[in-house]
Image: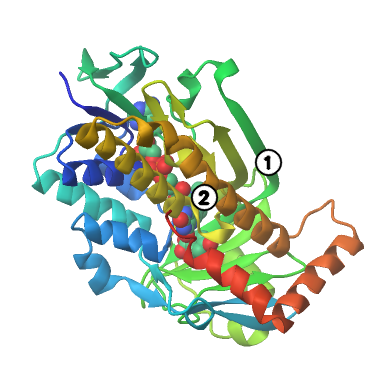
Amino acid sequence: MRTQVAIIGSGPAGLLLGALLANAGIDAIIIERKSRDYVLSRIRAGVLEQGTVDLLRSVGVGHRLDAEGMAHDGFALAYEGRTLRIDLKTLTGGRRVTVYGQTEVTRDLMDARAAAGLTTIYEAENVAVHDFDTGHPRLTYVADGVTQELHCDFIAGCDGFHGISRASVPAAAITLFERVYPFGWLGILADVPPCDHELIYASHDRGFALCTMRSTTRSRYYIQCRAGEQPGDWSDAAFWDELRRRLPPEVAARVTTGPSIEKSVAPLRSFVAEPLRFGRLFLAGDAAHIVPPTGAKGLNLAAGDAFYLASALTEYYGEKSLAGINHYSARALDRIWKAERFSWWMTTLMHRFDHHSTFEQRMQVAEFDFLRSSTAAQTAVAENYVGLPLV
Ligand code: RFL
Ligand code: PHB
């Protein structure tokens, strides 16, 4: 088999890249290790930047997003029992975010791909990349017990943090930057109305908590937990009790509880690989970088990478120019590092760290107090939260 661009992974990065390439008339095949249903069962991101929404509209999947996505003009930070609203719309000259689950983004992109007759191979085993340092890269994988070969011009490694693309690069050719946080997020999904119409990020002596949502009838809540804790360690009742303890009393009073329909623990990590190009292999999305979820940047960064990589490949095929391809890594990393900074900052501000002294705890409070008193500081938060421009 042959294609122009072989994409590994059908998460947001791979699917959006495939859609953008199809828009530009470039042929691409997606090779995914899991089944379609498995990919759709992963409950992850919920907040889309304006730029991500615009990209999704540009590939023709804006319809359901526009109908069902919830535009949010602000969010709240809570600490010491008080809340501070960050007015995104006013502070950024009219920009906002959209709450629409990653599952729905993925479903829309998969459906559009299937409707356009574009090829995705699910449940591909033993995917391996070969010869990406030559002019003739290829992938091998096993489908239904038979080894297959896919020849291509380029390989896009969109296979997430645990994928094989980054792992296939010689260690001497790649530099990794990492911080692992000493805690995780325990999240639950429940068919109960959200406690507020906007998101609330709460810092508390007992740990961080986040109130978010998927719709007016479906809520998503997270609490900071110890690294290594399992979802089964927490009954629903224990979760709801702990959540309410960490929220300002008037918010806690509005929390409607109910049985969880999903419960999972996510570790928190900051991670960047440099560069993002190795001959004819590119890395994009979580394969290249991880942010802790506090800034809601992971999916949005994946979308940004897909946009930059699609532009580079479009330039290559359209103008026979290598300029875009040569520039992809630097262009994407510039924005990635800024999102890494924001996510690290917000994580450090909002969480309890066992090793923090009382001094560091007072620094967190001073930072909140400064934010409350400074429109300039709130503007910096708002600019980052709605998403830095895709330049
Ligand atoms: P994905 O989504 O992990 O997709 C990678 C795909 O590659 C497949 N794969 C392979 N395929 C073939 N061969 C192999 N060897 C393969 N190995 C892996 C996988 O099966 C998978 O289908 O990466 P991608 O596309 O880069 O997308 C990244 C986002 O999924 C991620 O950054 C976000 O979910 C992060 N995130 C959030 N991002 C936001 O922008 N806003 C949020 O509000 C937000 N909240 C979150 C989050 C992530 C969370 N967790 C669980 C880590 C909340 C949570 C709790
Ligand atoms: C979510 O809705 O799952 C969500 C929202 C905001 C975050 C992280 C996750 O910062």
The foreground one among 4 and 220 is 4
Q: Quadrant of ligand 1?
A: top left
Q: Secondary structure at mark 2?
A: helix
Residue 385: x and y, percent?
53, 66
Mark 2 / mark 1, whichever is N-terminal: 1
Q: How many neighbours does mark 1 have within 10 angstroms: few (below 14), some (14-19), or many (20 or more)?
A: some
Residue visible at 85% across and 55% down? 356
Residue visible at 52% across and 40% down? 289
Can residue 380 be seen at all in this image of the molecule? yes
Quadrant in the picture for residue 149: top left
Residue 284: x and y, percent?
42, 38
Residue visible at 22% across and 46% down? 19
Q: Which residue is mark 2?
A: 335
Identify the coloring: rainbow
Q: Amino acid at mark 2?
A: Arg
Q: Which residue is mark 1?
A: 179
Residue visible at 46% across and 72% down? 258
Can residue 221 be seen at all in this image of the molecule? no
Kindly report the distance in space between the C-alpha atoms of the residues bearing marks 2 and 1: 18 Å
Residue 77: x and y, percent?
63, 75
Up-down: is 281 above or below 235?
Answer: above
In the image, the residue with mark 1 has its CB under 8 Å from the nearest atom of ligand 1: no
